[in-house]
Amino acid sequence: MANVDKIFIDSGLSIPDKTLSHVGIMGMHWGRRKSEGSTSEDHTTSRAIQKKSVMSMTNKELKSYNERIQLETTYKSLNPTKLQKGAKLVKGIISNADTLIKIYGMANTPVGLGIRKKMGLKVPVPKVDVSKAAAECKAIFDKAIAKSKNVGGAGI
């Protein structure tokens, strides 16, 4: 430490304070700015009404709060996040893979062998453990879901 102090003194700079201090707003996340005026009047009103008990709300307040919540829910369902779109895609892929695994498993049953024989297919279908393949697909899907939750998504 003495060498660092000497470098500062030799260069004509003042020695910096050796304490660690917090210069942000407590509770704020790193790299996020506090937006001002970003909430609408309806949103602010509905959140104020939400703090009341149902018994103390007027009919008008209850109606406006219910309408706001219904509108927010409808908006969220009509405008999925990127995470929700990706999860839907992954579910579709896993579903298709599961169907293919079942078809593949059926091809090696006596019925499947009979169908292949009637169709004149002579290409043998290699044996695969269908339950193991299905378990691997499920593990991949579960891993993708867990990873998406760690990224900060809202979940699926």
Image (spheres, rainbow, N blue to C red):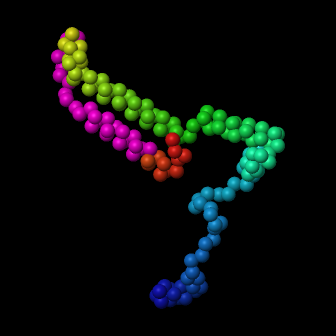
Position of residue 129 relative to residue 11, above or below, is above
The majority secondary structure of the magenta stretch comes to helix
Q: Does residue 30 appear to the left or right of 63 in the view shown?
A: left
The magenta stretch spans which residues?
A: 119-145
Q: Residue at x 35, y 30 (%)?
A: 98
What residue sits 39% from the left and 45% below the top?
A: 143
Question: Is 136 inside the magenta-drawn segment?
Answer: yes
**Residue 139 located left or right of residue 59:** left
Residue 64 falls in which quadrant of the image? top right
In the image, 28 versus 115, the foreground residue is 115
Residue 88 position, x and y percent, is: 48, 35
In the depicted structure, whether residue 115 falls above or below residue 76: above
Q: x, y (%) of residue 7? A: 50, 86
Q: Is residue 13 visible?
A: no
Question: Most extreme residue toward the top, as rendered?
Answer: 118
Q: Is residue 48 visible?
A: yes
